[in-house]
Image (spheres, grey):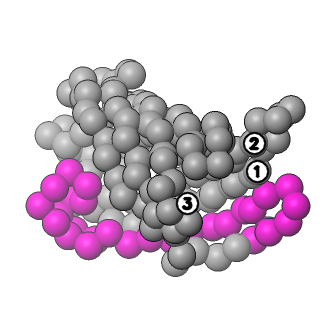
């Protein structure tokens, strides 16, 4: 659930509460997890270059003796043309508090670089790559990214 706190010429600011249901992945603790997130978004314009900056900071409470997490996600979107946008993203997770040692603990930062091509007014395709930049106790990931966008 997301609630807008500010929506004006300078950008938007909101608070979001999420609940993650049990699953057999590292995304959940095997129990119900909860998260509170603050999101800030702003349009950017520098000379002829336009785009946006979006960032979110969250605290995720994890159950079953997993460590809680501080999370930060940031996206910079740069409009290259009317139909092409460059996306630069970072994703950081830092564990906090006590928890069992068989689960992820420490810190991790991943970066993603991709291009979004809008081939129709409401449709686009995103292609790029993702890599782990830093981390303790995490695999060094390198992955391709592909997504289909629909604007509504």
Q: Which mark is residue 37?
A: 3
Across and down, in percent, residue 71 comes to: 47, 46
User: Relative to 150, is 106 above or below?
Assistant: above
Mark 3 touches mark 2? (CB < 8 Å): no
Q: Is residue 151 magenta?
A: no
Q: Marks 1 and 2: which is nearer the front?
A: 2
Mark 1 touches mark 2? (CB < 8 Å): yes
Name the N-terminal-most of marks 3 and 1.
3
Residue placed most toward the observer, 59 or 127: 127
Q: Residue at x 75, y 62 (%)?
A: 12
User: Relative to 138, is 145 above or below?
Assistant: below
Q: Residue at x 88, y 61 (%)?
A: 9
Q: Which residues are magenta?
A: 5-32
Secondary element at image label 1: strand
Distance from the alpha carbon under mark 1 to that under mark 2: 8 Å
Residue placed most toward the observer, 66 or 54: 54
Q: Marks 3 and 2: which is nearer the front?
A: 2
Residue at the disc numbered 2: 50
Viewport quadrant of the C terminus: bottom right
Across and down, in percent, residue 6 comes to: 79, 68
Residue at the disc numbered 1: 43
State which quadrant residue 137 falls in: top left
Name the N-terminal-most of marks 3 and 2.
3
Q: Residue at x 27, y 46 (%)?
A: 99
């Amino acid at each position: 659930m997301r609630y807008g706190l500010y929506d004006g010429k300078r950008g938007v600011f909101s608070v979001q509460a999420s609940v993650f249901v049990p699953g057999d992945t590292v995304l959940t603790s095997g129990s119900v997890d909860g998260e509170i997130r603050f999101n800030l978004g702003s349009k950017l314009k520098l000379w002829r270059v336009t785009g946006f900056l979006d960032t979110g900071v969250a605290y995720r409470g994890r159950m079953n003796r997993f460590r809680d997490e501080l999370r930060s996600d940031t996206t910079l979107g740069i409009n290259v043309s009317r139909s092409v946008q460059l996306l630069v993203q970072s994703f950081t997770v830092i564990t906090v508090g006590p928890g069992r040692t068989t689960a992820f603990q420490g810190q991790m930062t991943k970066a993603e670089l991709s291009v979004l091509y809008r081939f129709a007014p409401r449709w686009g395709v995103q292609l790029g790559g993702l890599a782990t930049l830093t981390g303790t106790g995490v695999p060094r990931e390198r992955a391709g990214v592909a997504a289909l966008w629909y604007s509504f």
